[in-house]
């Protein structure tokens, strides 16, 4: 048995999405900018896909731009907000310490270009407050970017409240909704956001397709220059098969959102109960305000990397945090921002579920993890010191 529990890194393609893509790859391969009949048919498919996203997000089709993924959407949103601010002499941007690197590293680049960035601290429950945002806003603040749901600890942010604070202050607001999309209801008008990023491969669509919602009146700055595709906002021949697959996957995820969330929440909570029953284990992030499929715990006295390798050998695909940090020895910036000490943050495990996971998957995980944790602790000199009272337990 092999259980895939790394859906925050990427998801399996839905069969519906795959079926929708195949004709675009086989017969209907024409360029949607071409004037001939096959080209126009491809353009129609693009229009339909745009309408699906618009309808499901409560936007209008002209407010939807297709990109190459969540990272590009985040880059373009932040650059656009920065440029619009700069034209008014505003060069201050607010975000948070636990954003995805697509946001954090774009902000670092903008800092080098003369922008000033404030990163908000993360409260111990993993939920940033609108009050924190209010207090950080200055007269020269151009843009606020706060993620909808965190990709490591799954906590859900009060996006509508934060958007209201920004609107009142006349500051643009972007949210990276990559992890929320398909799992939580998103209506851009109800939320009051100015820009919002999505990535298809996080909701059972193909990799390499992103969506950027930008409210009418928010002029996007180009990140990719070239042809006039996407109303001149994103050059390059559109990835028609990918976009069609993304729309089919999003439609499917939204149509089954409630039942999927119910199923995943039950699996998640059974995992959380089982794992936190292991001594000296702590759940990261609020237990309630979290994505239906996210479990993230720290086990004291072990290394997350060794845990992952052993779990893989026993048929479980998990993560110790974001895929972007694995391979480096630094603990997750998210867990550090949450206030976990280095030695605790190192012992993290993220299990992220999809609606394809089953009760049998959870049984398998719960039958394997406690034994592996015990095995690793028995081999750990740090655990030995903890048990002999030579250093204090932190959990
Ligand atoms: C995966 C992810 C991204 C990046 O999306 P890609 O399509 O892989 O570029 C951005 N933000 C969050 C929160 C993510 O989980």
Image (cartoon, rainbow, N blue to C red):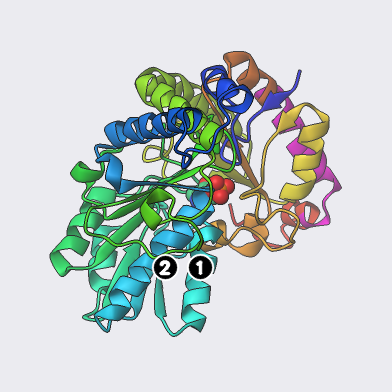
* Earlier sequence position, callout 2 versus callout 1: 2
Residue 90 x %, y %: 28, 80
Whether residues under marks 2 and 1 lie with C-beta atoms below 8 angstroms apart, the answer is: yes
Classify mark 1 as within 8 Å of ligand 1 or not, answering yes or no.
no
**Which residue is denoted by mark 2 in the rendering?**
79
The kind of secondary structure element at disc 1 is helix
Classify mark 2 as within 8 Å of ligand 1 or not, answering yes or no.
no
- Front in this rendered view, residue 170 or 215: 215
Residue 327 to residue 152: above or below = below
Point out the residue furthest to the front here. Answer: 36
* Viewer can see residue 133: yes
Magenta span contains residue 111: no
- Front in this rendered view, residue 326 or 310: 326
**Which residue is denoted by mark 1 in the rendering?**
106
* Range covered by the magenta-colored residues: 366-382
- Residue drawn at x 54%, y 26% is 354
CA distance separating discs 2 and 1: 8 Å
Tell whether 297 sits left or right of 143: right
Residue 108 x %, y %: 52, 74
Tell whether 44 sits left or right of 281: left
- Residue drawn at x 67%, y 28% is 4
């Amino acid at each position: 048995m092999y259980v895939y529990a790394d859906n925050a890194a990427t998801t399996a393609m839905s069969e519906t999405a795959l079926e929708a893509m195949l004709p675009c790859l086989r017969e209907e391969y024409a360029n949607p900018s071409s004037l001939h009949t096959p080209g126009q048919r491809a353009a129609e498919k693009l229009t339909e896909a745009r309408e699906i996203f618009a309808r499901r997000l409560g936007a209008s089709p002209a407010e939807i731009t297709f990109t190459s993924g969540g990272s590009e959407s985040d880059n373009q949103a932040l650059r656009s907000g920065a440029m619009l601010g700069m034209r008014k002499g505003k060069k201050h941007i607010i975000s948070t310490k636990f954003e995805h690197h697509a946001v954090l590293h774009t902000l670092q680049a903008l800092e080098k270009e003369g922008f000033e960035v404030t990163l908000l601290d993360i409260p111990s429950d993993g939920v940033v407050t609108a009050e924190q945002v209010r207090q950080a806003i200055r007269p020269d603040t151009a843009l606020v970017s706060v993620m909808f749901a965190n990709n490591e600890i799954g906590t859900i942010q009060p996006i509508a409240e934060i958007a209201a604070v920004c609107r009142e202050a006349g500051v643009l607001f972007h949210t990276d909704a990559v992890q929320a999309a398909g799992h939580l209801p998103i209506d851009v008008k109800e939320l009051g956001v100015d820009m919002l990023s999505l990535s298809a491969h996080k909701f059972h669509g193909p990799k390499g397709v992103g969506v950027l919602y930008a409210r009418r009146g928010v002029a996007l700055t180009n990140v990719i220059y070239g042809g006039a595709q996407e109303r001149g906002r994103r050059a390059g021949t559109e990835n028609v098969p990918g976009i069609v697959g993304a729309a089919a996957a999003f439609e499917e995820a939204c149509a089954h959102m409630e039942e999927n969330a119910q199923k995943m929440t039950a699996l998640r909570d059974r995992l959380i109960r089982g794992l936190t029953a292991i001594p000296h284990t702590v759940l990261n992030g609020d237990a309630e305000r979290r994505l239906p499929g996210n479990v993230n715990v720290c086990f004291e006295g072990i290394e997350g990397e060794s845990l992952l390798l052993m779990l893989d050998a026993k048929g479980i695909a998990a993560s110790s945090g974001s895929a972007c940090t694995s391979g480096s020895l630094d603990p997750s910036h998210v867990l550090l921002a949450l206030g976990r000490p280095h030695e605790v943050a190192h012992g993290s495990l993220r299990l992220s579920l999809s609606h394809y996971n089953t009760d049998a998957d959870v049984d398998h995980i719960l039958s394997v993890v406690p034994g592996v944790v015990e095995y690793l602790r028995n081999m750990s000199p740090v655990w030995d010191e903890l048990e002999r009272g030579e250093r204090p337990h932190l959990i």
